[in-house]
Amino acid sequence: MTSDQHNEVSTNMNNTIIKIGMIGFSLQNTWAIKTHYPAIQQLSSNFQISALYNESLDESFQTIRQLKLENATAFPSLESLILSSNIDMILIAIHDKNYDPLIAEIVSYIQQLATVPNHNPIKYIFLDWPLNCSIEQIEYLVQETAKLDIQTVTSLQGRKSPYVMRAKDLISEGSIGDINSIEIAGNGAWYGYERPIKSPSYLYDMSNGKDLVSNAFAHTIDVVQYITQSHFKQINSMIFNNIPKQELIDDNGNRLGEFVEKKAPDHLLFQGKLMKGNVPVSCSFKGGKPTKKFTKNLVIDIHGTRGDIKLEGDAGFIEMSNLVLYYSGMKVEDIPSDASNGNVKTPGIYDAGKEVMEFYHLRNYNALFGNIFRLYQSIIDIHLHQLNLKSQQKFAYQGFQKEGYPTLADGLILYRLINSVFKSNLLGSTLDVSNLQ
Amino acid sequence: MTSDQHNEVSTNMNNTIIKIGMIGFSLQNTWAIKTHYPAIQQLSSNFQISALYNESLDESFQTIRQLKLENATAFPSLESLILSSNIDMILIAIHDKNYDPLIAEIVSYIQQLATVPNHNPIKYIFLDWPLNCSIEQIEYLVQETAKLDIQTVTSLQGRKSPYVMRAKDLISEGSIGDINSIEIAGNGAWYGYERPIKSPSYLYDMSNGKDLVSNAFAHTIDVVQYITQSHFKQINSMIFNNIPKQELIDDNGNRLGEFVEKKAPDHLLFQGKLMKGNVPVSCSFKGGKPTKKFTKNLVIDIHGTRGDIKLEGDAGFIEMSNLVLYYSGMKVEDIPSDASNGNVKTPGIYDAGKEVMEFYHLRNYNALFGNIFRLYQSIIDIHLHQLNLKSQQKFAYQGFQKEGYPTLADGLILYRLINSVFKSNLLGSTLDVSNLQ
C-alpha cells in the first residue's frame, strides 16, 4: 500500500455511507419505526435508507412519502431489491414474522448477484433478532454469508446498554473481586393473566422467538454472559404455562370478559454454573402484570469477593429498559498485598475503610432507541476502522469484547443455549452446555 | 367418662409438669443454654429439668450447681437415666454430635423400661434437629416411638416464628390471591472464605446435618412449604464447593494466615415446582461473610395474583433470625364479584384503590430463643388439650396445621427432600419428589 492510497482512504472515512435496503419496513412496523429508523436518521452521514421492500408496493411508497425518505426507492420484489438496488446492507426487522422463508430467498438472490459482473456486493446482513427463525436457517445463513464475505449483525443490543457496559468494566477491572454468585429475577409483563387487545399476537406464539424464554430471558442471559465474560457449563430449567387463558383488556386496562388461549410459557426457572469460576447463577423469570411491590421488575444481583453490583429496571426486558446500576466494593488498586504470602493479593482481603460506592443512572436515557443507536454506532466504528486499515476482513463475532457488535455467530451461541433451556425442561435433566460455542 | 373425672382433669390442667431428662445438656452446650434452657425456665409451671446425663458425671453436677437446677438429678449413664429417673420427656440437643448411636441406645432402654411393671412411661422424645443422624435411624425412631406410644417433637422451629405464622395466615386468608412465584436468596455466613477460629468444626462436617444444605437451606425450605401449605412435586439442585480452603480468623476478624480444608458446600442452587398451584420456586443459598450491600442476607419474595409478601432477615438462618414482613395486596373481602361470570371472583381482578399494606416487625424479638420458646408453648398447649379431652392419642404430625408442633414425621419428610436435593445434584437430574410424604 502506498502512502497516497492510505491517505485517499483516510480522507474518505467520514464520507462513508452504508446504503440500507429495508425489508418489511413500513409505518406499521412500530419496532423499526421507534428504533432502527431514528438511529439511521441520527447517523445520516454514515447510513442511508436506499431501498424498501414490502409485500405491498403501496405500503413502501406511502412510507417513503410520509417519512420523506428522499434517497429511497421502493422495489416490487425482494429479488429486484437485491439484484438492482446497489445497497450495502440488508436489514430485516419484522417482529411478527418467522424469517425462515425470507432467509432462503435472500440467500439465493445474493448468490445470484455474486454472478453479475462488476456488481456492488452486499456487505452486511442485519437480522433483528436471531431467534426469529429456525436454528437451522441461522446456521445456513452464517455459513453462506461466510462464503460470500458478508458481515452479519444481530440485535443483542442489551450488550450496548451503558449500564451493561459499566457493569462489565467494573467486573473486568476487578472491582468486585471474583464473582461468587448471581441472582436474577425478571418480570416480563406480556405473558400474564391479561392480554391487551392491541398487543401483537406474535408475543404469544412459539414460532417467532418472542416468547418469555426466547426473548426476555434470552436477552438477559446473553447480557449476563457478556458482563461476566463467561458462557455456561451446566444448566437446568423448568418452564411453566400456569396461565393457559388470558383475559382481553382494552387500552384503559378494562377487562373485557373475553378469554383467549395462551400456549406460550409464563414462567421460567433457570439455574446454572458459569465456566469461569464455576459461578452459581439463579434466575426466575415470570410473566404477568407487574404486581411486585417490594422489588423491581428486573433485578440482577452480582456478588463478588470484594463487592456487589446490582442492576435494576422497571421492566423485565434488559435490552430496552432504562436501568440503574449500584456498585459497592473495594477497587483492586486498594487491596493491600499480603507480605507474608509473597505479596499476593488474596481474594478474601477486604478493608471496609477503602470501600467505594457508585450509583449510575442516566435519567433521560431512552433505552429502547438508545441501545439500537449505539449498536449502529459500533457498526460504523468497525467499518471505518477496517477501511482505514485496508483490511476487508469480516468482524467474525463480538464474543465478550467491548468493541464491536453482536453478529449471527454470537446469536447462534445464544440460540443453542435457549434450545438447551427448552431441552432441559423437556428431559428433566441438568445439561452440559460447555460445547455450544 | 363421668363429669367428676372430667372436672378432676380440668382442675389439674395448669399443674401439669412435663419432667425432662436432658441428654448432653451442660454449660458447654451453648445452643441448649441459649434456647431450650431459658424456654423451660420461663415455662416452669409446665416443664422441669429433672434429670441430666453427660458423658462426664462431673459436668452434669457442675451444670446442676451453676444453674441451680434444684429438681434435677445427675445420672451416670443413659441407661440409668431412662430406667430410673421417672421422666416424661427425653431431650437431645447436641449440635456437634451425630445422634445415631444415641438413638439406638435410647430405643433399647425405653423398650426395656416398657417391661418394668408399673413404670412411668416416657411420653416425649424431643430431638433437636432431625438431620443430625442418618435417615434410617430417624425412620427407626419414628417406627419404634409409634409402637411405644411416645410422642416425638423436633426443632423445625422456623414454623413458630411470628413472621412465618403471619405470612402463612395472610396466604391462607387469600390476601395475596393465588401464589404465582417464590424467590429465595440466603446467605449462610458460616460457609465462606473465612473461618472464625472458635467456630465449631461440626459446621464444616457433612455428617451432623449442619452443612449449608442440611441446615440453613433445610430450615428455609421447610418454612416455605409450611407457609404455602404445599410440598414440592419436582426439584433440581446444584451444589458447589467453590471455597475448598478457609482462612482462620481470630475473634476480632483478623486473618491468621492459616488455612483449613473445607469439604462442605458453600453454595446451593435449588429450583422446583410446588404441588399446589404448580408454583415455581427459585432459591440461591450462598456461604461467605455477608458482603451483600444491596440486599438482605435472607430474602423470601412471594408473589401472588393479588399481592406480595416479602420476608427479610439479616442472616440466612430463618429459624433463628429476627425478620421483617412486608405485605401489599388486596384482601379477599374487597374483591368485586364478576356479575357477568356467575359472581365468580376471578384471580386477575385487582383494584389498586383497595390495596392495603402491612409492615410487621417486633423490634426486640429474640428469634434464637423465641422460636424455640414458642415451640415449647405449643407442646404444652397440645398436651393440656389432650388431657382435657381424655384423649391420649398421639399428635401424629403437624403437617401444615397452624396449631401443634413439628414431629419427627415432619422431620422425616424434610429429610427426604434434603436427600433428594443431594441426589439431584449427584445425578444431574430434575427429580419427582411428589412421593416423599
Image (spheres, coloured by chain):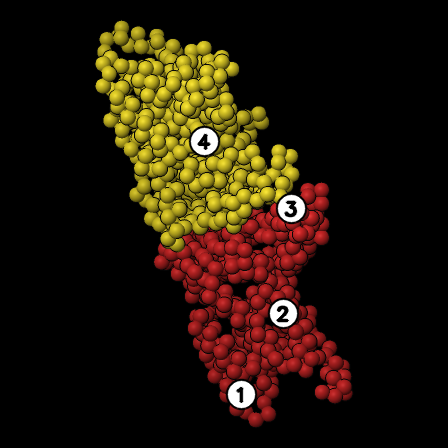
Chain colours: A yellow, B red
- Other-residue count near label 2 (Cα within 10 Å), few / some / many at <14 / 14–19 / ≥20: many
Disc 3 target residue: B349
Name which residue type carries label 1. Answer: Leu
Q: CA distance from mark 2 to mark 4?
A: 56 Å
What residue is rendered at 37% in x and 43% in y?
A419
Q: Would you say residue A295 is visible in this rendering? A: no
Q: Are marks 3 and 2 in contact (CB under 8 Å)?
A: no
Q: Residue at x 54, y 31 (%)?
A: A322
What label sits on residue B404 in the rendered view?
A: 2
Residue B242 pos. (x, y %)? 39, 50
Q: Chain of mark 2?
A: B
B256 relative to B298 in the view: left or right: left
Who comes first in sequence, dot 3 or dot 1? Answer: 1
Q: Does residue A118 appear left or right of residue A339 in this picture? A: left
Of helix, strand and loop, which one carries label 3? loop
Label of residue A95 in the image:
4
Q: Nearer the viewer, residue A115 or B2?
A: A115
- Structural crowding at the residue carrying mark 3, measured as other residues with C-alpha within 10 Å and reported as few (<14), some (14–19) or many (≥20): some
Looking at marks 3 and 2 on the same chain, the residue that comes earlier in the sequence is marked by 3
Q: Which residue is mark 1?
A: B113
**Secondary structure found at label 2:** loop
Give the position of the N terminus of chain A as an image quadrant.
top left
Is the residue at mark 3 from the same chain as the one at mark 2? yes
**Residue B425 x/y as whole percent:** 39, 56
Mark 4: few, some, or many residues within 10 Å (few <14, many ≥20)? many
Observer-nearest residue: B41 or A296? A296
Asked if the residue under mark 4 is in contact with the one under mark 3, i.e. CB atoms within 8 Å, the reply is: no
Of tags 4 and 1, which is closer to the observer?
4
